[in-house]
Amino acid sequence: MPERRRFEHRSQPAWVAMEDFLSEVVVKPDAALKQAVRSALDAGMPAIEVAPTAGKLLQLLVRMSGARRVLEIGTLAGFSTIWMARGLPQDGTLVTLEYSPDHAAVARKNLDNAELGDRVEIRVGVALNSLPELEGGEPFDFVFIDADKQNNSHYLDWAIKLGRPGTTIVLDNVVWEGAPLDTSLDPVNAPGIRSALELLGSDPRLDATVIQTVGSKGWDGFALALVT
Ligand code: SAH
Ligand code: DHB
Ligand code: MG
């Protein structure tokens, strides 16, 4: 399946029009957020950042949970990063892990432009190499997982390890147009997404649910979990 197109050709005009309306009327991304989206397009990155409505949800969850330390896996151009960092208190910090030095450079610019540069650390490298380096620090209060889907279960495990009872975890892209029901639809990503869903439902250290979504990003969803 031509992966990068999946979320575009399946997006129905009515969903997108409604989402644009919700974004403009309720969520209202400012110039720095709009610039982050534009910079990603200009740099030739895929338009796989969270929708503005989802970004605002992440920000509200960070605020509602009182998180002071946020971990993100998968930065891209820093769009979700900006939303979450803006939910932090004055002394809050965010660490975001990104494999691509090019993506990280664009994200750094966008975070500086949003005046969040001093609160956000971007660690460039394979996330599974960066995660062990974070051990021994203060626990993370909030973890957003949004990188390579094959490693979702490993990322959940690391989120638990680097978190504490009460840590909030959000795992993106868990519905993936229904492919977890028939993993042959996307043999690269769907098995990892499905295994992570099974882990969310069976690991006694997690209490979780999933919300399905439609909109500019097609038919997808995210998991919300609490470390118990
Ligand atoms: N969270 C972003 C979107 C992330 S897209 C937003 O909503 O704005 C996924 C990102 O994960 C890409 O930038 C990709 O380069 C990165 N990525 C993929 N595999 C990775 C890995 N193994 N380690 C770290 N980053 C990875
Ligand atoms: C893809 C990745 C994402 O994180 C996302 O939100 C949508 C699509 C992708 O790799 O196709
Ligand atoms: Mg995603």
Image: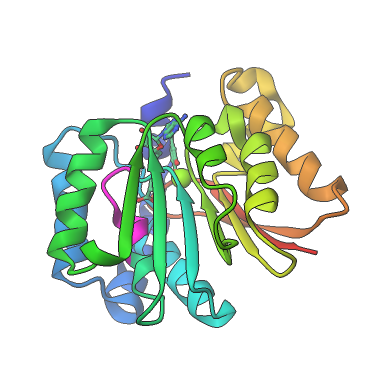
Q: Is residue 133 left or right of residue 169?
A: left
Q: Is residue 217 left or right of residue 25?
A: right
Image quadrant in which the C terminus is located: bottom right
Ligand 2 positioned in quadrant: top left
Q: Is residue 87 visible?
A: yes
Residue 221 sits above or below residue 31 on the image: above
Q: Which residue in the rendered view is the most extreme toward the front?
A: 136
Residue 44 sits above or below residue 120 on the image: above
Residue 125 image point, x, y percent? 38, 31
**Quadrant position of residue 184:** top right
Q: Is residue 148 left or right of residue 31?
A: right
Residue 20 image point, x, y percent? 30, 65
Q: Could you say which is closer to the camera, residue 33 or residue 137?
A: 137
Q: What residue appears at the point 71 percent right and 39 percent down from the top-left corner?
A: 196
- Segment colored magenta: 76-82
**Quadrant position of residue 24:** bottom left
Q: Could you say which is closer to the camera, residue 181 or residue 16?
A: 181
Question: Is residue 21 part of the magenta span, yes or no?
Answer: no
**Quadrant position of residue 167:** bottom right
Residue 189 image point, x, y percent? 57, 26
Q: How many marks?
A: 0
Q: What residue appears at the point 18 percent right and 67 percent down from the top-left corner?
A: 114
Residue 193 image point, x, y percent? 65, 35
Q: Could you say which is closer to the camera, residue 222 or residue 151?
A: 151
Q: What residue appears at the point 61 percent right and 21 percent down from the top-left corner?
A: 185
Q: Could you say which is closer to the camera, residue 1 or residue 9?
A: 1
Q: Is residue 18 visible?
A: no
The structure's colour scheme is rainbow
